[in-house]
Image (cartoon, rainbow, N blue to C red):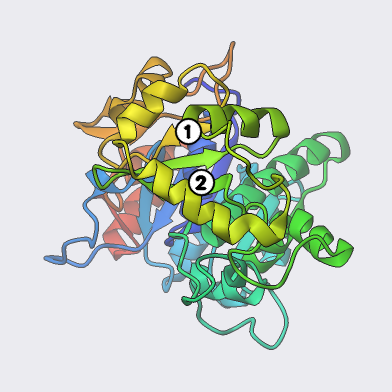
Amino acid sequence: MTGPLNGFRVVEMGGIGPAPFAGALLGDLGADVLRIDRIAKPGVEPDLPPRFDFYNRNKRSVALDLKQPQAVATVLDLVAGADALIEGFRPSVMERLGLGPDVCHGINPGLVYARMTGWGQEGPMAQEAGHDINYLALTGALHCLGDADRPPPPPLNLVADLGGGAMYLVVGLLAAAMEARQSGRGQTIDVAMIDGVTHLMSAFQAFRQQGSWTGRRADNIVDGGAPFYGSYATSDGKFIAVGAIEPQFYASLLKVMGIDGEPLPDQNDRTAWPQMRKHFAQVFVTRPRDEWVAIAAGRDACLAPVLTIDEAPGHPQMQTREVYARFDGVQHPSPAPRFSRTPSVLRTPTPAPGRDSRQALADWGIPPDQVTALEATGAMAQG
């Protein structure tokens, strides 16, 4: 085991989306993450083969039937020896299973109990279904994205699920774990994606109240309104991205484009931005993408190629930092961030449900006769 969280034990209740991503990040950092999966039905193939389920790498899996009391009791036995628990169900589901925070803290007062939802544990929408785009919509963030004359596009599921959800869960869990080492007392972490995204929107909320951010899409400095911050088509049908906000970088960009000698409006003259965007587009479309990249190299013009998902791993910068790694026969994003003394590694391929049931339960201190009884009654399955 390596990584700064070596020896840190996490019980993760099996689910989809941001909670598993948070668990994988903790696993990358060295935590012993034990995922409680449902028992797979015979003959039913998973939607995503384990080999390609990157959100569940660096974990082990125990398959339990939580409708059976013996299985629930086993989860509580695991909780007794855990540092943290992660769950991503709708509010009250864990309570109905007999695994709510009060029960778990009664067994392990030092446990950090991290709950992940989209809408939060309370409120008129708490029990409603949703996905990243829905949570993003409620925060005002989605309305800020995209072209002015088109509906806001979904920014993958990076912003609410992962940025406003998983990352805040990990920060909250680790902060509570640090506090628990001093106080000896755990606590419940209520992670709502609408909270996290709203927090991520702090600067734009401030800009709006200050008056420097309009309520229109593609009309502001970093939403595509400014000509010096956005993407442009090139002559080969590809794209480049520019982000020359500071005056010195903007001046360098104009030189790269070959228009620094033209009588141009002031950089921050918003009334001129639409015309300047058209002018920039006319210039950038005259050369292929990689030629622009070569011209801008080393000149602090804040210009980069818009690479496809297939091109990105081959870029020299990505290769030098080994941003991707071959593992279990496929290409994984490498663990991040980097640690000088306790490096994170890819050590365990994603398990099929129940792959580690017997061994993991034994490692976590569950007596052999209890494991045998669980399997005999069908409350546990070995994958």
* Residue in the foreground of this view, choosing between 281 and 211: 281
> On the image, which quarter does residue 244 sit in?
top right
Q: Indicate which disc, 2 or 1, sits on the residue closer to the N terminus.
A: 2
- Residue 378 is marked as none
Around disc 2, counting alpha carbons within 10 Å, would you say few (fewer than 14), some (14 to 19), or many (20 or more)? many
Residue 223 visible from this viewpoint: no
- Residue 23 is marked as 2
> On the image, which quarter does residue 199 sit in?
bottom right
Q: Which residue is mark 1?
A: 257
| Side of 352 where 268 appears, left or right | right
Tell me the amino acid under the disc marked 2: Gly
Q: Residue at 51%, 65% (x, y): give it.
A: 146
Camera-side mark, 2 or 1: 1
Percent position (x, y) of residue 219?
A: 64, 64
Percent position (x, y) of residue 224?
A: 56, 56
* Residue in the foreground of this view, choosing between 214 and 7: 214
Q: Secondary structure at mark 1?
A: helix
